[in-house]
Amino acid sequence: MAALGLAAPNLPGRRTISALLLVPMIAPVVIVGVGMYFVFSMAGLTATLPGLILGHTSLAVPFVVVTVSAVLTGLDRRLLWAAASMGAPSFLTFRKVTLPVILPGIASGALFAFATSLDEVVVTMFLAGPGQRTLPREMFTIARDTLTPTIAAAATVLIAASIVLLIASTALGRSNR
């Protein structure tokens, strides 16, 4: 939805909003993690599942916004005007015209967001409580203490998943063209 809003040519402060949405992708992850920790601790969200979900979501948003925005640049506005001239309401125009065009971008963004969240250990260390054990956090803890074959197996699965995500993203990019 952010990418759709940012695609509007008359949105005031569009560049500022875009820059703010891209900060988690550009800033070093340790700085983002410390910042999230301080903000979330004031809101009482540290060591909670909603806080962890919100933290991972804020890290994933830039990837989705970038991919959907890239697809939206290829959207022919005349299709939207044609649907409106035929009397289609805004929601129907979105569902029947815009959504099918941007669906590959949404899927690619979701794949990138999933991969980013799966790889994120630093922010998880800052935000998660002792009972919240994510896969990257567990791998980091085990690798720090003792190296076991479990780490090698989990790393192999993560590499294979990354390859599958890369292939899926490439296939979605080709289907969009």
Image (cartoon, rainbow, N blue to C red):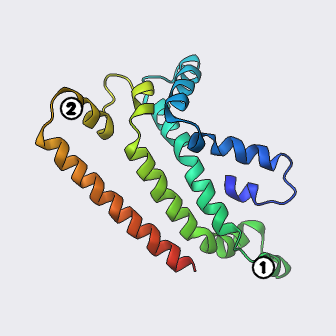
Q: Quadrant of residue 167?
A: bottom left
Between residues 39 and 24, which one lies in front from this camera angle?
A: 24
Between residues 166 and 107, which one lies in front from this camera angle?
A: 166
Q: What amino acid is found at the position of numbered circle 1 in the picture? A: Ala
Looking at the rendered structure, which numbered label has been put on residue 142?
A: 2
Earlier sequence position, callout 1 versus callout 2: 1
Percent of width and height locating residue 66? 62, 57
Looking at the image, is 160 positioned above or below residue 76? above
Residue drawn at (32%, 39%), measured in percent from left and top?
A: 136
Q: Quadrant of residue 159?
A: bottom left
Q: Which quadrant would the C terminus be assigned to in this image?
A: bottom right
Looking at the image, is 104 positioned above or below residue 159? below
Percent of width and height locating residue 16? 78, 43
Looking at the image, is 79 positioned above or below residue 18? below
Q: Which quadrant would the N terminus be assigned to in this image?
A: bottom right
* SS under mark 2: helix
Q: Is residue 15 left or right of residue 165?
A: right
- Mark 1: give few (<14), some (14-19) or many (20+) Cα within 10 Å: some
Q: Is residue 166 left or right of residue 24?
A: left
Percent of width and height locating residue 132? 34, 29
Looking at the image, is 152 positioned above or below residue 49? below
Furthest residue to the left?
A: 149
Which residue lies under the disc numbered 1?
83
Percent of width and height locating residue 86? 82, 82
Residue drawn at (39%, 27%), measured in percent from left and top?
A: 125
Name the mark nearer the viewer: 1 or 2: 2
* SS under mark 1: helix
Looking at the rendered structure, which numbered label has been put on residue 133?
A: none
Residue drawn at (60%, 74%), measured in percent from left and top?
A: 100
